[in-house]
Structure formats: C-alpha cells, structure tokens
Amino acid sequence: MIQNDIKRSVIASTAGAAIEWYDFMLYGAAAALVFPRLFFPHASPVTGILLAFSTYFVGFLVRPMGAAIFGHVGDRFGRKKSLLATIILMGIGTVGIGLVPSYESAGVVGPILLIILRSLQGIGVGGEWGGAILLATESGSRGGRGFRASFPQAMSIFGVGVANLAFLAVGLGMSTADFMTWGWRIPFLASIVLVGVGLWIRHRVPETEEFRELEHSGRIARAPLIRMVRESTPEIVLTALLKSAEMIPVYIFITFILSYGTRTLSYDRNTLLLLVSLAAVIAALTMPVIARYGDRAGHRHVFMAGAVAVALFTFAYFRILDSGSAVGAPIMIVLSLVPCAAMIAVEPVLITGSFPPEIRYSGASLGFNLAGVIGGGPAPFVATWLVMHVNSMAIAAYVAVFCLIGILAAQALSRRGAQHPAASPEGSGRVTRDRGLLSRAR
C-alpha cells in the first residue's frame, strides 16, 4: 500500500508539473513570436521584443509572492492543498491570456490585461515547484529522493517542448495571418482541459508521509515565513544563486533563441519551434538517469560538473550559430539543454535539503522563485540587450559568470551543513547528526 502511495505521489507531482509548466512556458513562445506585433504594434521590432519580454518578466517578478502564499499554505495545511490551489490559479491565468483582446481591438487595455493574467500565472507557478518536489520526495526512502524528484523536474522541461509543439501544430495548419490573429490563442484555451485532468489526479493523491508526521507530532510551524526568514535567510540567498546559474542558460536556450533565431539568424519559426521542442524532450529523458547517478555519486558534484559543461557549451553554441552552419547550428540547438539537465536533475535535493521540514515548502519555494527574478525572468531581456550593444559572446560570458556563482553557492550550502534527511521511516527526525557526516553523505 505504501509503495502504491509513493507511486501515486510521483505521478501526481509529475503530471501537475507538466501541465503548469506547459501553461507558464506558452507565454515564452508567444512573447517571442506573437506579442510584439499584437500588443506593441507601434514600437520598432527590437523595442517590441523588449516590451514583450518585459511582460514575460512580470511572471517571474511575482513568483516570490506565490512562493510566500503557497509556501505558507503548504507548511501549515499540507502540500496537497497548496498544489490543488496552484493549478487552479495557473489555469485561470492561462485561459485568460487566450482571451485577451489585441492592441488594435482594445488599445492599452490589451497589454494591461496581459500583465494581470501573466501575474496570476506567476503567482500560481511560484507555489508549484516546491510542492511538486516535496510531493515526490517526502515519502519513501532517502536514497532514491533525487531519482523521484527528477520526474517533476523532467516534466518542467518537457512542458517547454509540448508548449512549442502546440504552437508548431497550430501554425502548420493555417496561414501566418490567421495564426497571428487567432490561431496562437488555441494552445492557451486548450489548457482548460489539462487543468481539469491535473486537478483530478492531484485530488486522489495522499498527503506526504513527512507532513503527516509533522501533524502527528505537533511540529507544524505557526508562522513558517517568519521562522524561515529568522533561521534560513543565508540558505534562501544561496538557493536563489544556485538556481539562477541553471535558469539563465535555460531561458536563453528556450525563449531568447526564438526571437534571435527568427530575426537575426533568419531561421524559420516552425523550424526553431521544432528544434527547441526536441531539445526539451531529449533533456527530459536524460534527467532520471542523471539523477539516479547523483543519488550514488553525490548531487553537489553532479551539479558542479553540469555548471562547467553549460559555461563551455554556451560559447560554442553562439559561435556555431553565428557561423551560419546549416548542420552545426541545428545540432547545437537540439543539444542545448542536455548540459543544463545535469544541473536541473539534481538541484531539488540540494535545495529542499537545505531547509528543515517545518519550513521546507516556504524556504525551497522562495529560494527557487527568487532565482526567477535574478536570473530566469531577465535572461531573454538581458540577452537581447547584450546582442544589440555588444555581441553574442557577451551572452556566453553572462552565462559563464552565473555558472561560476552557482558552483560557489553549491559549495557554500555544503559547507553550512544545512542538508536535512528526506522524509522516510528510517530517516525522519534524524537531523541532529554532525555536519561532517552530512557533508560526506552528500
């Protein structure tokens, strides 16, 4: 029975993550391909892109708010209740975006509604990641927690691929004019079906073992946010820096490339969508394998190796893309997310393990989503500015600097000895072992 509950928890966290990240990343493709012309028609092409990416960034800016709200709910009332609320809020934002009138139809009302609904998306996804990861890891043995967490992680990237494929499928069946007028709305409106499926799956899943233990022992934090700030501020900052090192290259490879490739490199829109989708699928398939290795070899070491690989790869990526190679450029785009996968696959254990279970949802969520403000959200905007005023190698340097910061953050978290055993019958509550043993266990 316990094993069945664990499987259901992993399935629920995985399915929900795929749906929410599909919703959130639809906006990235639309911001690069549609929104500049639809909502900012009087701006120059470059300014239109920057304005569209600015509204894209809004979703990241409000994510810490979602982390605070749903982290409190998850730590006080349960991981499951919080995750049901996040998927509803995400669905409202996504379907609403599909109904927003263009600038031509409603003037500035269109962009304003776009920002409001993007904010709802951001608040929803702000509480999603921490809950999905804890749903997968807070039941079962400690030894397989990285492997279990890799499935919702993989689905977050897989959702990117599905979002791009949705745009590609719609675009192939109609003219460019129809796509720009109403076709782009279909993937957003279709989300209502996915959200219904996600709610049904998550409603059937049990609460995590560790949260039930907290309830039974009377250890539920009354004010998890206050306690988190008082006790774990350094871990929050380090978590945000660690996650930023992965977020920046990912959002450059999946979002910035869509505008850079179509406008600067003259790639066909559908070709780019297909290549980025393939990159997401390949990366998603590799993550469980990498996470399984990380459970044996050490999550921190795998993360650091991935950061070095990402930094080196990004220089080669832009060098080959700018060369115009008909063979090399598509290969680099398809492989772009594989080095990132090494970081993505193991970071859940590094992040959630940095906080005690009473404030784990709040702490992990806030650190994760602050990275969106520092790294993921601004990345397409910064990359666009850098390529306009310097060159593409400046983007690679930008990525490399944050990869180094991520390595230093991972080491600092390890030195603080802040890891806590994942919820398990044999490990629950055993958080008093000395820091040296914790470091060696990692």
Image (cartoon, helix red, strand yellow):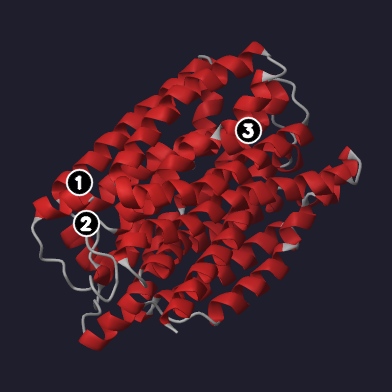
Label 2 sits on residue = 419
Seen at 17% across and 49% down, the residue is: 439
Q: Residue 316 at x, y = what percent? A: 52, 18
Circle 2: residue type: Gln
Circle 1: residue type: Ser
Q: Are marks 1 and 3 in contact (CB under 8 Å)?
A: no
Q: Residue 175 at x, y = what percent? A: 91, 41
Q: Is residue 148 left or right of residue 436?
A: right
Label 3 sits on residue = 334
Q: Answer yes or no: is residue 388 visible.
A: no
Q: Are marks 1 and 2 in contact (CB under 8 Å)?
A: yes
Residue 24 appears in which quarter of the rendering?
bottom right
Query: Which secondary structure, mark 1?
Result: helix
Circle 3: residue type: Val
Choose the circle earlier in sequence order: 2 or 3. 3
Q: Residue 416 at x, y = what percent? A: 15, 49
Task: Give the CA distance from mark 1 to mark 3.
Answer: 33 Å
Q: Reply above or below: 91 against 146.
A: below
Label 1: how many residues lie within 10 Å, few (<14), some (14-19) or many (20+)? many
Label 1 sits on residue = 414
Q: Residue 11 at x, y = what percent? A: 54, 69
